[in-house]
Amino acid sequence: MAFHPIAADDDDCTVNVARKYAWIVFALTFGLLISDYMSRQVLNAVFPMLKGEWALSDSQLGLLSGIVALMVGLLTFPLSLLADRFGRVKSLALMALLWSLATLGCALAQDYPQMFIARFMVGVGEAAYGSVGIAVVISVFPKHMRATLASAFMAGGMFGSVLGMALGGTIAAKLGWRWSFAGMALFGLLLAVLYPLIVKESRIAPQRATQALDKAAAKARLRTLFASRSVIATYIGSGLQLFVGGTVIVWMPSYLNRYYDMGADKAGGMAAIIVLCSGAGMILCGMLSDRLCRHSPERKVALAIAYCLGSCMLLSLAFALPAGPAQLAMICLGMLIVAGTTGPAGAMVANLTHYSVHGTAFATLTLANNMLGLAPGPFITGRLSDAIGLHGAFQIVPLVSVAAAAVFFYAMCHYHKDIARIKGQKVPDAVNAPGLEVKL
């Protein structure tokens, strides 16, 4: 049987994971991420129906979407820290169970306050899944695949968004919007039951990662979360860039409904194609990062800057065009690279933090992504839409990518120096253990 030699940040912690089992772990974790985003984004496909049935404003609709991202932003760090300490596998299963039950609650909601509470609980359940899930995935594959794995895994969010909006719109058109939520909930519940039966903590975690730590060692590891200016800039730049991509995903079905006169099913299908472009681009950009930057880490940041500026140019041009095939094609091109920063950002965070706190490190990245991008983006755009129309709001949103590029440029100025410094840094690994050299 083929094995992946899995190295954490130190060579002594190398373990062997069967290649077939590693891909099974990836598939199941990826499947739960798809369920996560299906449950999150199905709401966008039924925006027009909820707006008409409950007489809601765009600000209220944006808040229903933004509350999930807000809870993810607020809770991802503490919940990921608990998952790193008490077990990632059982934590992931509990998260999936909670968000699936909450999605079922959305199907049963009778008014806006009940829907808001259900969406609040969806956010609580999904809070730490992305960060803990990617920590599980990178723990069973070689280190040189980090950008590809990070981008491919997080692209599951895009594919889940595609399925959530496309299937949600289709089901809503045929059976009503409540069945859209119910379908997503049943899929999540099935995976939540299967996951802990197949994925075992003892088979995916290096032995040292499960050893008890004294307080000094734990604090030393946690300090790597903010040990360099480049990793802090990566958190911020990634969050700002996702302001753009996340906002377009949330509001695209409504944009197509208003400016192209599409029904919920057609708007959901077209929006799904646009989001699919973003997911495919995320994977391709991550693969390009690993291929071009294996021996030159600074290129990861340069590519992130290029993705930011390129998406800004393409999306600004798209929303300057009138409604029609040319505009849709330009939107697809812009969305192809708008999330290209995900792979480089994930690899940089993994390289600059200790393996035992990778769940918490990705939680910090997720915190920035949500608090700077995914949470405020839909709400701010909704407020702009109420004032100047959704088309006018979309003309302003891509400019945030310029700020993201500026922050990534700051990271590039310090990245090489930070890597060189952290390579020689000693980090305590366990009780009474000698210092551990962090190798990148």
Image (cartoon, rainbow, N blue to C red):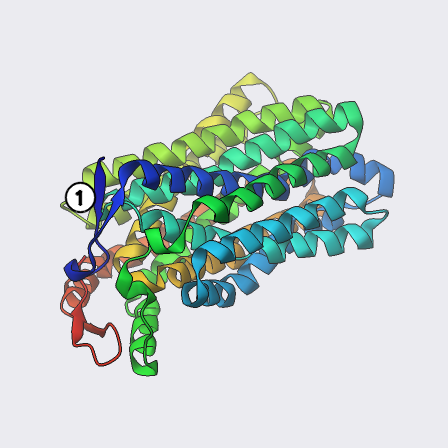
Q: Residue at x 29, y 60 (%)?
A: 355
Location of residue 426 in the rendering, given as x and y in whole percent from the top left corner: 18, 73
Quadrant position of residue 113: bottom right
Query: Depth check: 313 or 104 in front?
Result: 104
Q: Residue 55, relative to residue 207: is it above or below?
A: above
Query: Depth check: 407 or 202 in front?
Result: 202
Q: Residue at x 27, y 38 (%)?
A: 19
Task: Residue type at mark 1: give it.
Answer: Arg
Location of residue 93 in the rendering, given as x and y in whole percent from the top left corner: 53, 52
- Using the rendered image of the protein, determine whether residue 249 is visible from the camera's viewpoint: yes
Relative horizontal placement of residue 247, taking residue 140 as reference (left or right): right
As drawn, the residue found furthest toward the top would be 325
Location of residue 70 in the rendering, given as x and y in whole percent from the top left corner: 60, 58
Residue indicated by mark 1: 294
Quadrant position of the N terminus in the picture: top left
Q: Residue at x 29, y 35 (%)?
A: 287
Q: Residue 70, relative to residue 381: is it above or below?
A: below
Q: Residue 375, relative to residue 386: is it above or below?
A: below
Relative horizontal placement of residue 165, taking residue 431 as reference (left or right): right
Quadrant position of the C terminus in the picture: bottom left
Location of residue 7 in the rendering, given as x and y in whole percent from the top left corner: 21, 53
Relative horizontal placement of residue 129, taking residue 265 as reference (left or right): left
Q: Residue at x 67, y 21 (%)?
A: 266
- Using the rendered image of the protein, determine whether residue 309 is visible from the camera's viewpoint: no
